[in-house]
Image: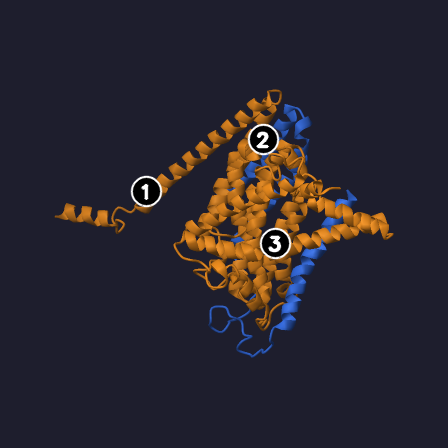
Chain colours: A orange, B blue
């Protein structure tokens, strides 16, 4: 095996070399599989946790720049060691355990929240040869692991012996389960199109990336995944600029740090999932023959999606809880169901047509539905405005209103 | 196939192990100087009043119930979605009728006002 072959697929080459080494040492096949899987999982998990440091730094820097600030700029060049310094500091901070906490949920919650984020990585196909686990029910696994995060949050709020933490946990989990519905329905549509629940099959089915087939579905999925991560503009359960904290008020030291890590890591991992499902994952020119390129494509696509999320976080104001629930239940969910039904019908109608016609039909369908949704929103917006200025006897105090009234009196 | 689940199992163990060990390590490294004031519950700064585990809003319960409708629906529809490529149009229409029945429940809830946050 020469050097070029190694560069084409370094990880599989190392795995093969290790497997051969183990078999020459007389380790049986099933044990060597176990050891290789164990090493792979350990490396992937540790790498993800360490990369979080970079993501925290990058996100603070980008949001700083978006909001006309510098962001971290003291520790190291461009403040790049800021999150390392934060980590060292948080490692040696005291763990304050308040009186009367429910010990089991209180201590388990941070571990479960981080675990629920890390576990998603197990099913992501990284390149054409390297897929963590090619599970045949990966989509269900994805939804189940999302539910695990909610359990972690409820446990944190419940165990804290703090009414505000409990309330925040209820709100956060209500938000998360609500936004899981449009997400699940859009996942259903992608399963419909690819004919399999396995992630690597979904990637392989994307001769045309699903974002071109389902732009509206991708939009719904993106909004829902932002909301499910509890990030701005849907971060009212732990609004940093308004509340002390959310469900994690009573946590300190590294236990709080774990919630923080989970928050930032989840942003990237949901971007990875988005890239896998809608942008074609590792697919790209030459990715079939040179698997190493696949990983690079996946990372570039995910970074792009991640940056969009950060951009939104840096620029949009926060929603109220009633608005947030309304967006989900009265807009996104019916829209997703409508999209599902229409895709089901038209998919069968253009079944025998050429692939180009199929793509164009789906695209047109999505845009018609998008236009319809925008029309509904506009109509609603008009009605809202009338309701606001509705009481004629008490006009809203706005400069133009006051001016008009004064002129009428004068 | 079993191998895939083995990998998932290993990954679950590792993803619980990594944060767990980090927290334990930090517990060992960090100072421990508890005082009664420090250990009191933070809440809003005032001393905490009454029990924590109180009754909460019924609204959350309603959302959980509505969530259940859709969760069951998606679980039933996933096998259908996998088989979508091989089935005739007739079965698709049946699936749409299934969705329509569930959506009528959803509309009922909507009209009842359970989806409005009060």
- Please tell me which of labels 3 and 2 falls first in the chain: 3
Position of residue A308 relative to residue A196, above or below, is below
B89 or A1: which is nearer to us? A1
Q: Which residue is mark 2?
A: A208
- Name the residue located 59 percent from the left edge and 22 percent from the top edge: A349
Q: Is residue B57 left or right of residue A407?
A: right
How many marks are shown on the rendered structure? 3
- Name the residue located 59 percent from the left edge and 24 percent from the top edge: A355
Is residue A33 among the parts visible in the rendering?
Answer: no
Badge 3 marks a residue whose secondary structure is: helix
CA separation, marks 1 and 2? 45 Å
Badge 2 marks a residue whose secondary structure is: loop
Disc marking residue A149: 3
CA separation, marks 3 and 2? 32 Å
Subunit of label 2: A
- Please tell me which of labels 1 and 3 falls first in the chain: 3
Spot the residue most to the right.
A26
Q: Are marks 1 and 2 in contact (CB under 8 Å)?
A: no
| Position of the N terminus of chain A by quadrant | top right
Position of residue A345 relative to residue B20, above or below, is above
Looking at the rendered image, the disc whose residue lies closer to the viewer, 1 or 2, is: 2
Q: Which residue is mark 1?
A: A386
- Please tell me which of labels 1 and 2 falls first in the chain: 2
- Name the residue located 66 percent from the left edge and 68 percent from the top edge: B25
How far across and down, in percent of the image, does residue B29 sit? Answer: 63, 72
Looking at the rendered image, the disc whose residue lies closer to the viewer, 1 or 3, is: 3
């Amino acid at each position: 095996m020469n050097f070029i072959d190694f560069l084409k697929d370094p990880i599989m080459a190392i795995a093969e070399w290790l497997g051969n080494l183990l078999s020459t040492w007389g380790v049986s096949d099933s044990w060597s599989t176990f050891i290789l899987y164990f090493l792979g999982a350990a490396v992937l998990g540790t790498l993800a946790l360490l990369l979080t440091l970079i993501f925290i730094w990058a996100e603070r820097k980008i949001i700083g720049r978006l909001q006309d600030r510098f962001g971290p700029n003291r520790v190291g060049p461009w403040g790049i060691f800021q999150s390392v310094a934060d980590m060292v500091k948080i490692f040696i901070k005291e763990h304050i355990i308040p009186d009367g906490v429910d010990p089991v949920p209180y201590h388990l919650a941070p571990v479960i929240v981080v675990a629920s984020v890390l576990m998603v990585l197990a099913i992501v196909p990284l390149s054409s040869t390297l897929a963590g686990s090619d599970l045949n029910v990966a989509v269900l696994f994805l939804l189940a692991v999302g539910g695990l995060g909610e359990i972690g949050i409820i446990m944190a709020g419940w165990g804290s012996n703090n009414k505000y933490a409990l309330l925040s946990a209820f709100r956060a989990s209500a938000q998360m389960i609500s936004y899981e519905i449009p997400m699940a329905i859009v996942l259903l549509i992608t399963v419909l199109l690819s004919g399999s629940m396995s992630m690597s099959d979904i990637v392989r089915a994307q001769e045309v990336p699903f974002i071109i087939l389902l732009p509206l579905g991708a939009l719904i999925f993106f909004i829902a995944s932002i909301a499910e991560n509890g990030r701005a503009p849907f971060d009212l359960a732990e609004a940093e600029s308004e509340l002390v904290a959310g469900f994690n008020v009573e946590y300190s030291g590294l236990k709080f740090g774990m919630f923080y890590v989970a928050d930032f890591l989840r942003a990237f991992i949901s971007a990875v999932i988005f890239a896998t499902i809608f942008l074609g994952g590792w697919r790209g020119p030459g990715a079939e023959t040179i698997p190493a390129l696949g990983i690079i494509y996946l990372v570039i696509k995910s970074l792009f999606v991640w940056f969009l999320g950060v951009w939104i976080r840096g620029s949009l104001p926060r929603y109220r809880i009633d608005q947030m629930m309304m967006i989900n239940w009265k807009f996104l969910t019916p829209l997703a169901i409508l999209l599902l039904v229409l895709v089901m019908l038209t998919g069968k109608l253009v079944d025998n047509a050429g692939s180009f016609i199929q793509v164009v039909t789906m695209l047109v369908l999505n845009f018609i539905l998008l236009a319809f949704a925008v029309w509904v929103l506009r109509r609603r917006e008009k009605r809202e405005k009338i309701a606001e200025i509705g009481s004629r006897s008490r006009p809203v105090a706005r400069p133009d209103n006051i001016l008009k009234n004064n002129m009428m009196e004068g | 196939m079993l191998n895939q689940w083995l990998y998932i199992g290993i990954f679950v163990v590792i993803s619980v192990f990594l944060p767990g060990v980090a927290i334990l390590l930090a517990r060992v490294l960090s100072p421990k100087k508890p005082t009664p004031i420090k250990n009191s519950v933070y809440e809003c700064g005032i001393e905490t009043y009454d029990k924590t585990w109180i009754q909460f809003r019924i609204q959350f319960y309603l959302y959980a119930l509505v969530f259940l409708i859709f969760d069951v629906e998606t679980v039933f529809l996933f096998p259908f979605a996998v088989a979508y490529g091989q089935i005739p149009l007739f079965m698709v229409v049946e699936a749409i009728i299934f969705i329509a029945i569930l959506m009528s429940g959803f509309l009922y809830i909507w009209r009842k006002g359970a989806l409005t946050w009060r």
